[in-house]
Image: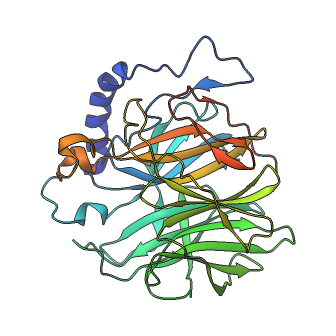
Amino acid sequence: MQRFLRFCLISILFTFAVVGTGVSPLSDSASKNQGKIAPKPLYRDPVYDGATDPVLCWNRHEQKWFMFYTSRRANVPGLSGVTWVHGSPVGIAESSDGGATWTYRQDANIGYSKGQDTYWAPEVIEHDDMYHMYLTYVPGIFDNWSHPRSILHLTSKNLLDWDYQSTLKLSCDKVIDACVMQLDDGTWRMWYNNEKDAKSIYYADSNDLFTWEDKGKVIGDRPGEGPKVFCWKGYTWMIVDNWQGLGVYRSENGLSWMRQENNLLETPGTGNDDQNKGHHADVVISDERAYLFYFTHPGRKGPDAEKDTADQRRSSIQVVSLEYKDGWLKCERDKPTYIHLGPVPK
């Protein structure tokens, strides 16, 4: 009830705040094929103002897009250290206009709790009329980064209520940020971050999404987290948050990876809440167009960058179109992004 009342109050304030964003999601110049111009920011969580780690999934039953995200408690006063990054629920926003306009729906009902829970970086996919979530879990609320983390497997029929299935047995007791994709042979592969091995990217394979066999390290040339793997333009791509923008890797077989020279979103943009590096991204392919969803810390810039107030803690979700040029990926975050996410075929 307290969270709901907090949501109502902050939503009223946001109604006035977004008037001055300067970018309309309903531009007259956008054609039906192009979609609408995405506003900057695309989305701010109206409860805790700490939306990070976005991942999108088509809600087949409601015929709309859902965005799941780590809901960091950025605006809660009196939280020392990184306590505000812990105790985070999984927020859900929804869009009925192809991804241009997002509104807060609710927090996901996670069927796994031990009293004081921290949920990070949900990965959500659909398979055989069932939704699967692979969720980073920290057993408690802490003011530092030293505690164990694991990846939970949960399932749902409605994308709102999630039943616990298992805790995955992976390479160690400090793993985060799962990404799951089906391979050409029908099996499944998961990429994740092994924090104990210098923040390297590891992978595991499964025949059924329930039982996983760890396969070891796949990328370790530099530290990173939040791997996102997708297929586009004849290649398999992996995007990794290196904290200096997003590193890009390209592969022809999903095992051997070549790194792109330049990171994406390393240079700050000029748009509202976009004047900082991009972090932990998702990619959605729709009508052969690729959209990169990422988050920023808008307050971490200029002389106040190193402060630790609500402004430095808060985060916003943004979106930009990916472009393919000369065998590699680029994006121009200051150009208007016309977005239209269509329904996902069954």
- Residue 285: quarter of image: top right
**In the visual, does 128 lie left or right of 334?**
right
- Residue 183 position within the rendered picture, expressed as x and y whole percent measured from the top left: 80, 68
Residue 157 visible in the shown view: yes
In the rendered image of this protein, does residue 132 appear above or below residue 297? below
Say above or below: 260 vs 113: above
Instruction: Name above or below for residue 109 compared with residue 140.
Output: above
Q: Which residue is at the front of the view, 304 or 99?
A: 304
Tell me which residue sits at (85%, 67%) in the image.
184
- Can residue 55 be seen here? no
Front in this rendered view, residue 86 or 4: 86
Residue sitting at 25 percent across and 35 percent down?
9
Residue, x 42% and y 29% (percent of image)?
A: 271
Q: Is residue 19 above or below residue 57?
A: above
**What residue is rendered at 29% in x and 47% in y?**
314
* Residue farthest left in this picture: 78
Q: Position of residue 67 (x, y in %)?
A: 54, 47
Q: Is residue 307 left or right of residue 70?
A: left
- Quarter of the rendering containing residue 276: top left
**Residue 330 at x, y = what percent?**
62, 43
Please identify the quarter of the rendering in which residue 286 is found: top right
Where is residue 149 drawn, in percent x and y? 41, 79
